[in-house]
Amino acid sequence: MIRDILYARFGYIPLPRSQDKLNEDHAAERQEGKSVQHHCIIVRVDKEYRDMFFQFIVEQPGGLERNYRSCLNQTLYHYFDMAVPRLLH
């Protein structure tokens, strides 16, 4: 679901994937989420989407770090109705 929301944010349409591949990705995301020290949600995205996302951030005026935080904050607030964590301010 989160992957779909991220893709929709930039109008990205991924190539179709088999149910086995989807299940494999979900299992890998859960495993990675357990291995990190901080509570977070791991989401794997297509390489093309990742490139498009970072290109968007780089092309925004201002500092990279601020642009990255701003994009994440907007996504958290708009799609998940979440207050932005203090860490991302």
Image: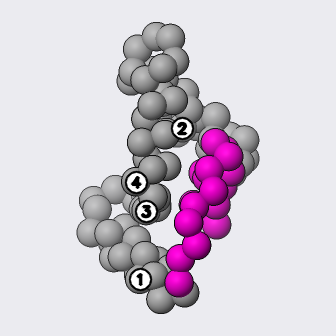
Type of amino acid at the residue the image marks with label 3: Arg
User: Is residue 3 rendered magenta in the image?
Assistant: yes
Residue at image location 62% in from the left, 50% down from the top = 12
Q: In which quarter of the view is residue 2 placed? A: bottom right
Q: Is residue 84 toward the left or the right of residue 52 in the image?
A: right
Q: Distance between the residues labelled 3 and 1?
A: 11 Å
Looking at the rendered image, the disc whose residue lies closer to the viewer, 1 or 2, is 1
Sequence-earlier tag: 4 or 1: 1
Which residue in the protein does label 2 denote?
Answer: 72
Sequence-earlier tag: 2 or 3: 3
Residue at image location 64% in from the left, 66% down from the top = 1
Provide the residue span drawn in magenta: 1-18
> Element under label 2?
helix
Which residue in the protein does label 3 denote?
Answer: 44
Say if mark 4 contacts mark 3, CB within 8 Å: no
Looking at the rendered image, the disc whose residue lies closer to the viewer, 4 or 1, is 4
Sequence-earlier tag: 1 or 2: 1
Type of amino acid at the residue the image marks with label 1: Glu
Q: Distance between the residues labelled 1 and 2?
A: 26 Å
